[in-house]
Amino acid sequence: MYSMNKKSCGVEKTLKIIGAKWTILIIRDLCDGVRRFGQLRRSLDGISPRTLALRLKQLEKEGIVKRKVFQEIPLHVEYSLTGKGASLREIVIKMREWGQAAAKNLRVKGESREITSRVKIESSKAEGM
């Protein structure tokens, strides 16, 4: 039987790392491949540059995101998932599936709301993880 011991709760530990606002959406976008800061910012409607920078820095510190600086003119930086970060792909897929299923029953002022996902992960990619 699964123990719900709070000291060793994997859910709690996971949420401490990826539970902050915007974090899972950053991971979702990086599941599609390498992104620059500006690409992530445009994809995440409403995120401030400061918040995006903080989340990326935290994800890098946790070993989930890799930051690669290109010493060119103009200087640019690319972000990608590490192996540890790519292991979150299944969580993102399950969240997408759950959200799509829940959206079928969601009603807002008498209208149904459809939730779409920007995760474009082929099942073959997911199976290869």
Image: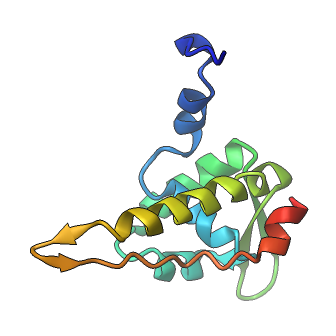
Query: How many callouts does the rendering have?
Result: 0
Residue 71 location, x and y as percent?
82, 77
Q: Give the residue at x 72% y 50%.
A: 64
Quarter containing the N terminus: top right
Which quadrant would residue 37 be assigned to in this image?
bottom right
- In the rendered view, would you say 4 is above or below 127? above
Residue 114 location, x and y as percent?
35, 79
Q: Closest to the observer: 23 or 111?
A: 111
Whether residue 104 sits left or right of residue 14 in the image: it is left
Whether residue 35 sits left or right of residue 21 in the image: it is right
Q: Give the residue at x 64% y 18%.
A: 2
Q: Closest to the observer: 26 or 41?
A: 26
- In the rendered view, would you say 21 is above or below 48? above
The single residue placed furthest to the right in the displayed view is 128
Q: Give the residue at x 73% y 73%.
A: 78
**Which color scheme did the rendering employ for the protein?**
rainbow
Quarter containing the C terminus: bottom right
Residue 101 location, x and y as percent?
45, 65
Q: Give the residue at x 20% y 70%.
A: 107
Q: Closest to the observer: 24 or 97?
A: 97
Whether residue 60 sits left or right of residue 4 in the image: it is right
Residue 13 location, x and y as percent?
59, 29
The single residue placed furthest to the bottom in the displayed view is 73
